[in-house]
Amino acid sequence: MNPAALLESTPVRHRVRGACPHDCPDTCALITTVENGVAVRVQGNPAHAQTGGVLCAKVSKYPERTYHPDRILTPLRRSGPKGSGQFTQVGWDEALTDIAARLAEIAARNPEAIVPYSYAGTMGLVQGESMDRRFFHRLGASLLHRSICAAAGGEAMVQTLGGKVGMKVEFFAEAKLILIWGSNSITSTLHFWRYAQQAKREGARLVCIDPRKTETAEKCHEHLQLLPGTDAALALALMHELIVHDWLDHDYLAQHTLGWEALRERALTFPPERAAEVCALPVEQIRDLARAYGTTKPSAIRVNYGVQRVRGGGNAVRAIACLPALTGAWRERAGGVLFSSSGNFPVQRGVLQRPELLGQRRPRTINMVTIGDDLLRETSEAFGPKIEAVVVYNSNPLAVAPESGKVARGFAQDDLFTVVLEHFQTDTADYADYILPATTQLEHWDVHLAYGHTDVLLNRPAIGPCGEARSNARIFRELAARMGFSEPCFADSDETLCRQAYGEKVDFNELLDQGFAALPIPDAPFAQGNFPTASGKCEFFSAALSACGQDALPNHVPNYETFGQSAAYPLAMISPPARNFLNSTFVNVASLQKQEGRPLLEIHPHDAAARGIADGSVVRVFNDRGSYLCHAELSERARPGVVNGLGIWWRKLGLEGTNVNQLTSQALTDLGQGPTFYDCLVEVQAAATPSNAINK
């Protein structure tokens, strides 16, 4: 589809306000320029302070994605073997009628045999978690623990600060010391990086803590390149030094924290020498960072999600989140920590999702991280019924879920009925029985929260749906009608759902007028304590964790697969996102794929030399879970002993039809039952170059 060919010689032009729907903290405000019904440009809204008119390279290519020649524009029914990608076009009525009949047949036996699978393909409250949840609640389907991104860190923040709350991102610009912990901010939270750069110009010191020498690390004053999964040990060593040198705010500790004496005792068992050994860092680097954090005011920490994708990820985030209370950093608006701001948003989820439609039923919950194992399970008393149907939307589990070899085998089962709502024929869509064409953000209503700032955003449709595409909410609304669900809530339009998302908590007219509305949050929300915990204090000691039989204090929990423990798999592997992709989204956008080049494994020159691996050569990365073929890039972005498998390419674009998640584990984190993508040991060896290798 060529949008330029659709334009007339004298275009009728207008601009529409919207919001970026993608899984990024920044939730940018958009302006889409439309000429004769065709979106010709997407740019940042300069009137929105957090966006400042600036978009990332990915979203600025949104028209290219919307009008992509491979866009699915009609319903498709499978006509070949599962995984073959062979489909024929069908009408909407035929597709929806058949899907409803198949789901009704399964539900008559046991509705828990039906599983929804969705995540953050859109972060919108309407297209992501409204009519779909109503549909599955009314059906009585299995619930889904949507844990694949931030479950461990989110639970850690709840247990420590009382919610996913923290300092306001704009005040990082006033900090004198910024710790960027587990975040490649240049690529993953561009607008925070703008504030960090502003602070740097004013004399602030920027320190990056990350196992990879990222683009962000290169722009900071210092980089602590620790081993994956050792962040809690570092945080506890910083506490040790704050205590020993009395870089503490005793009044804040006494008035606004819970469990200080117990945490003090724990921290004193982690001197810098112990942490240096665990983290594989110079001891003086740890001491110097502690001195800087203890003596510089205001000091701010931006901790991101990479920290918590290991076995002890929840404990690591807990330990980091405790630090500002030790020094009283919360007293100033440019002090504290930010992991996610999403807990500030007064979303009326009960109104959107209608859990009362379950009635007295209490379905089981499937963890999306373990979908590979769960699809292969048989009916049992412990598990419940075998999964007979999966409805996938806003996700691509074959590419993004761990141990993807098992995921592929699960979706390949002939007795599994699979429906996928999608824009493109992804790895997962190849295994569908039906693919239903979904609208993009430019084509539907939605309303958003953010997890990197505190503004609500509204998305208006800029263009009509391409082809026969329909919004997620409309698809579930129409499925509900065919299932005979007659409750009035199934008649709510997409715009009505937008209005329901916040109710009276946010002025919807303000959203209509300018596209965004700021939440009324104090500049320094915890200057006087008032944390949203049960005690109102920063809880170093969590009674809730203690009641569950877990360690009530943050601690260093070693990885399941600890560096140096296996002779067969001597290298630790992390799999951070490739710069030009966002999870598996944008992988098929030609301009971005060209910039990214090909699937890469960054390996330190010393590790490569020991294995006879040349720069650019094809390598096999493997462990007991599987193997992955890609190209090696000799780079000091990887520290010795650690390799970086940049993701997430679609499997079908890989050299052997796999991607980096062939190697990752379904093991879960200490808190929140999240994924452990960065807790992974591998070996790497030179391999023959296959015929489909991309040369660059």
Image (cartoon, grey):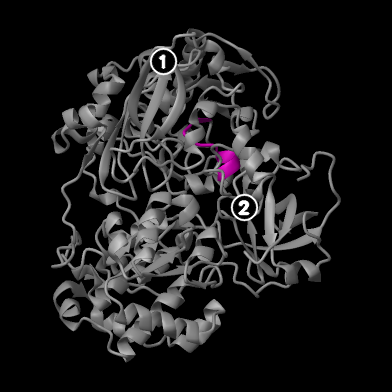
Question: Which of the 4 image quarters holds residue 504?
Answer: top left
Q: Residue at x 27, y 17 (%)?
A: 491
Q: Name the image quarter holding the C terminus.
A: top right
Q: Residue at x 68, y 56 (%)?
A: 601
Q: Looking at the rendered structure, which numbered label has been put on residue 464? A: 1
Q: Is residue 376 visible?
A: no
Question: Which of the 4 image quarters holds residue 70?
Answer: top right
Secondary structure under tag 1 reads loop
Residue, far front: 10
Depth check, front residue: 516 or 254: 516
Question: Which of the 4 image quarters holds residue 206?
Answer: bottom left
Location of residue 596 in the rendering, given as x and y in whole percent from the top left corner: 64, 45
In reply to whether residue 460 is colored magenta, the answer given is no
Mark 1, Cα crowd under 10 Å, few <14 / some 14-19 / many 20+, is some
11 on left or right of 78: left
Eyeballing the image, is 180 above or below 100? Answer: below
51 on left or right of 22: left
Location of residue 516 in the rendering, given as x and y in whole percent from the top left corner: 25, 36
Location of residue 330 in the rendering, given as x and y in whole percent from the top left corner: 22, 68
Type of amino acid at the residue the image marks with label 1: Gly
Type of amino acid at the residue the image marks with label 2: Leu
Q: Looking at the rendered structure, which numbered label has been put on residue 646? A: 2
